[in-house]
Amino acid sequence: MRKLVLAASSLLAATLLTPVPATAAPQGDKDVIVRLFQWNWPSVAKECKEFLGPRGVGAVHVSPPQEHVVRPDLGSPWWQDYQPVSYKIDSRRGDRAAFAAMVSGCKSAGVKVFVDAVINHMAGQDVPGTGWAGSRYDHYSYPGIYGDNDFHHCGRNGNDDIKNYMDRFEVQNCELVNLADLKTESEQVRNRIAGYLNDLLSLGVDGFRIDAAKHMPTGDIAAITSKLSRPAYIYQEATYAAGEPIQPDEYLRNGDVKEFRYGYDLARIFNQEKLSYLRTFGAPLPSDKAVVFTDNHDTQRGHPVLTYKDGGRYALANAFMLAWPYGSPQLMSSFEFSNNDQGPPSESNGRTKNATCFTDGWRCEHRWQVISNMVGFHNTVRGTNVNSWWDNGNDLITFGRGDKGYLVLNDEGSATTGRSFRTPLPAGKYCDVIHGDFAGGRCTGPVYTVDSGGWFRADVAAHDAIALHVNARVG
């Protein structure tokens, strides 16, 4: 039995009550979303065709495509893309034609495209500037789009920034770190935003991740999405904090919600507690309304979550997420960073470099063998219940999913040897997709024989796993 080495390099080497017209999605039997954070459009299209589609990924979540501020003085940080200056489809990831080609290419590969929609605010600079595509702007002036009266001026804190998250009015009417806060209760503003979203829909986009949803009343989001030209999947960024007046479940009326508590809790259990606690794992949001993740671009920068920097433990946590029946899983695919503002690998002119996995700082966690192979496991067992749970009271757990799949996770500091595991699987020979790729009836890794009683025998190394499913039967 090969050990799942903790170093990420070793892993890499191993290779709704929704207002019309929003829709509950991802539809069909593929609900895994991959977040290709800051990838440029040609790279996204290539990845859809060559990897995401063939691996059974349902959708790709892409970074904001609209024109944004340019901040070479700060090293072109990742967050400049979340400061819009116009709704032109022209960013450091590519222009309108490249974006349209990406959407078409991904859809041809069977992968839906969800766009990061920044609709709560515009830029955060207090001096006039020029955006990526040449648009002039000032903090409350975006010629041909918005003027001073289209923004909130809450007047509470001198610079209008949010100071008190226990005050609903302040959170939804004051400025998030100086970002010009749009007056989303205004019909004129709503029409502008809806026009941008409908432009993206006309290019074939399938849905939107609503950025900073918590900073907009639910009714404003509902009014905007009601103006969409056709059905689209909506999922919203609504973070949770104990005692705050604005809670994630308020946003369920508009679509799905990103469940931040999931990643925090999963990291705490893997890092500090016992895997046996995962027997009842979940989160407060209804499973069919939650988008779950181990980490995203915000939480991996300074929050208590597992990230690519945790290597094998991160892979195991993602394996559990893809095997466990709660929420629609979103996988993170990021780039290396040494400080929290660092932008993506870029050319000298500021354009994002092509994403070549495992080079130039692109981490491509979605391509790690453990994580990518568990997408097939997830698709195979989707819709089945957990059964055959067993744990040792500590960090060794096993469970089945219907009669479709079976997972063993050993996060103990030592191997478990000579143990027999009882599965719900039919008799046969199974590829361990944690350590091997399966194609054409053949497995590049270990193969286990399940007998007529559902039993198989295995050694499991420390901090390692075994995953078997009926669509990876050898021969």
Image (cartoon, rainbow, N blue to C red):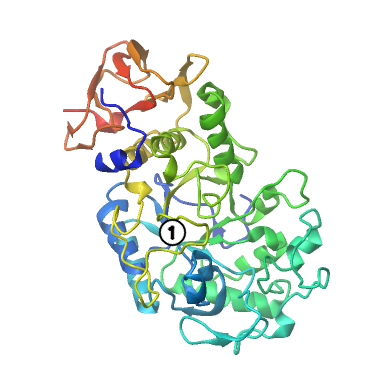
Q: Quadrant of residue 402?
A: top left
Q: Is residue 83 left or right of residue 344?
A: right
Specify the farthest residue to the right. Answer: 156
In the depicted view, which residue is nearer to us: 178 or 73? Answer: 73
Q: Quadrant of residue 110?
A: bottom left
SS under mark 1:
loop
Q: Is residue 429 visible?
A: no
Quarter of the image that includes the N terminus? top left
In the depicted view, which residue is nearer to us: 70 or 245? Answer: 70
In the depicted view, which residue is nearer to us: 146 or 109? Answer: 146
Q: Is residue 284 visible?
A: yes
The tally of labels here is 1
Q: Position of residue 137 (x, y in %)?
A: 59, 86
* Residue ID at (65%, 38%): 284
Q: Badge 1 local density, few (<14 within 10 Å), some, or many (20+)?
A: many
Quarter of the image that includes the C terminus? top left
Q: Is residue 112 left or right of residue 70?
A: left
Q: Position of residue 175 (x, y in %)?
A: 71, 68
| Image position of 366 with respect to 394: above or below | below
| Image position of 449 with respect to 348: above or below | above
Q: Position of residue 341 (x, y in %)?
A: 52, 62
| Image position of 384 with respect to 293: above or below | above
In the depicted view, which residue is nearer to us: 3 or 238? Answer: 3
Q: Position of residue 460 (x, y in %)?
A: 33, 20
Q: Is residue 99 left or right of residue 273?
A: left
* Residue ID at (47%, 80%): 132
Q: Amino acid at mark 1?
A: Phe
Q: Which residue is mark 1?
A: 37
* Residue ID at (41%, 33%): 316
Q: Quadrant of residue 218?
A: bottom right
